[in-house]
Amino acid sequence: MGRRRVPQELSPRALPRFFVSPTVLEARVLPDEVVHQVRQVLRLRSGDWVCLLDGAGGIFLARLGDDARIVDLYPSKLETELPYPITVLQSLARPEKAEMVVRLCVQGGAAAVYFAPSDRSVVQWDAQKQARYATRWQKIAQEEAELACRAYLPRVRLFDNWRHAFENLPRPVFVLDEWEGTLLLKRRCRRMPLPDTLSLVVGPEGGFSPAERDWMAAQSETYAVSLGARVLRTEDAAFYALAQIATLWE
């Protein structure tokens, strides 16, 4: 792709990064929202380089031309994903807390972030409100993924039912909670081979109800894990778990 040789010192980590669709890469014309960021916010000019991501692992170094055009496009590599995809299911929390969950989980390497109301969730939203927040949080996930130099675009999804959300999780599932047989997350990880996928489940501020604990404990490949001696806020727990997993297996 392109005629000029890409400068050797260029790295995706050192360049502004934007997620774009495959059609943008094919047409070599940047969308208006990216043009605004490039020209008006970052003040880049013709000849400058940016990194374009297709959201599915494709990474490209792009040299800007006049207007919104890309004059050179080169494939590149980016090794920033965890060894396997991790999905986080977070009990629905207040908007500011849920937004923090999205930001931290995307920075921590989560492949997907799910939300669903549990028995003790502080908020319960109708379908219209869920759709509005899902759109906003997906946009936040994209911004955080660009900042974190992620090759894949994490997906944010809201469910209206806790059990439905749980049943959609990839196995095995680690529930960040205390019940019979709970092991430290690190100890549980050391007892199992490197998985193909993994899910983390985080409860609300008041914890899971006894009925929810009993139901989750009866589900296949579901294990209770502890993050250690200290109790974390609900919006911080998944990120803390992702950091421990990265330390063990990244």
Image (spheres, rainbow, N blue to C red):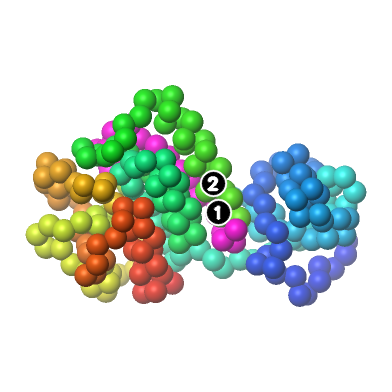
Q: Nearer the viewer, residue 182 or 122?
A: 122
Residue 247 is labelled as none
- Residue at horizontal 25 percent and vertical 57 percent from the top: 176
In the image, residue 153 lies in the stretch drawn in magenta:
yes
> Looking at the image, is 114 positioned above or below residue 234?
above
Q: Is residue 26 visible?
A: no
Relative horizontal placement of residue 197, taking residue 34 as reference (left or right): left
Residue 62 shown in magenta:
no
Classed neighbour count for the residue bearing mark 2: other residues with Cα under 10 Å, few (<14), some (14–19), many (≥20): some
Quarter occupied by residue 186: bottom left
Q: Position of residue 238 (x, y in %)?
A: 35, 57
Provide residue 6's location: percent of width, then percent of height: 81, 68
Nearer the observer, 121 or 59: 121
Q: Which residue is mark 2?
A: 140
Identify the magenta region.
147-168
Identified at 46% across, 35% down, the residue is 133
Kind of residue at badge 2 = Ile
Is residue 11 among what the camera can see? yes
Identify which residue is drawn at 21% across, 47% down: 206
Percent across and percent down for residue 105 are 43, 56
Given the image, on which type of amino acid does mark 1 rest? Glu
Q: Which residue is mark 1?
A: 144
Task: Determine whether label 2 and label 1 are within 8 Å by CB.
Answer: yes
Quadrant placement of the N terminus: bottom right
